[in-house]
Amino acid sequence: MLPSCLAFAAAVIAGAKKFSDCPDLDCSQMHVTSKQVSSGSSFGDEQQGLLNIMKGKIGTTGLFEFAEKKGGRMVGDRLAINCLGKDFLIDSRGELSSECHNNLWVHGPLLDYIVNGKGKKPTGTWLPFQELEGASDWGHFFSHRCEDEMLKLADAHPELFFELLELFGADHDVGQNADYSILLHPLPMVPMSFNYWLPEDEFPSKLTLLFDETTPDNLNPELIYTLSRGLVEMFRVLIVKHNLDGNLF
């Protein structure tokens, strides 16, 4: 038994599971989703396929009763969850709306956070991604595709990089010993600490991302990876858009 629908779908993409192995997916959903999640699809296409599974679950989860437990609130008949400094509104069909950064990288983890997250409050004990429970299989991918890519962006555009973090609702985190220590909340109970050291003498620059020890209780490690990789992609787009010369590097 896999811990979430998105974890199951990730196993389908990897070839370890078949859609017919899911007890909650009916024939019509299976047909649509299997067409969207194929071996030749892009990562974005894969995310869209995963969303179809989660949307099918939303209507049976008692979505609105979880508002307070998941750090959200009701706005009319929709659930509002603050994500990256902005409210996202989710209806009973799993459809999402927001004034900005409404994309697949956010939508999937957000739905899974609502449906499967335990609503466990952070303790303030910070860990590297690789030390989170259940994250070992994703550690290499996270280091290479998230932390390393964030470091490249911070090195190339330090001022703009940290302005973007503030745009996403970041606060200064004085608890970490770094030149820049920034606290970000991708989801209400999934805090992320950005720590960046400037190059000095023979020491190169360094960037680490830390997570509260309770994070795996609220979001699966593969979805933490998905959300972090989504941040990288959003930063890339915004830097190109707002950089004066229009170049990434």
Image: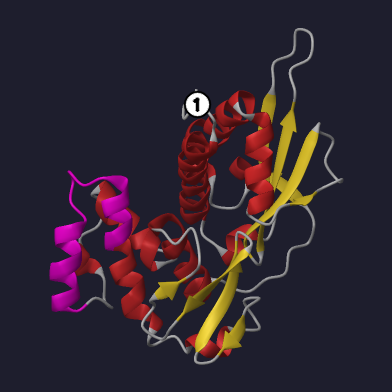
Camera-nearest residue between 11 and 180? 180
> Is residue 244 rendered to the left or right of residue 195?
left
Residue at x 48%, y 39% (from the top left corner):
241
Q: Is residue 40 magenta?
A: yes
Farthest front residue in view: 244
Residue 71 location in percent, x, y? 66, 76
- Residue 194 visible in rendering: yes
Residue at x 57%, y 34% (from the top left corner):
150
Coloration of the structure image: secondary structure
Q: Quadrant of residue 59?
A: bottom left
Camera-nearest residue between 203 and 198? 198
Residue at x 31%, y 78% (from the top left corner):
56
Residue 83 location in percent, x, y? 58, 64
The quadrant of the image that shows the N terminus is bottom left
Element type where label 1 sits in the image: loop
Q: Is residue 217 above or below residue 72?
A: above
> Is residue 38 rendered to the left or right of residue 236?
left
Q: Which residue is mark 1?
A: 245
Q: Is residue 8 above or below residue 238?
A: below
Q: Quadrant of residue 37?
A: bottom left
> Is residue 5 rendered to the left or right of residue 98?
left
Amino acid bearing label 1: Asp
Q: Residues within 10 Å of mark 1 (few under 14, many from 20)?
A: few
Residue 133 location in percent, x, y? 59, 53
> Is residue 211 rendered to the left or right of residue 150?
right
Q: Quadrant of residue 199?
A: top right
Mainly helix, strand or loop, the magenta region?
A: helix
Camera-nearest residue between 227 and 165? 165
Magenta residues, start to end: 26-49
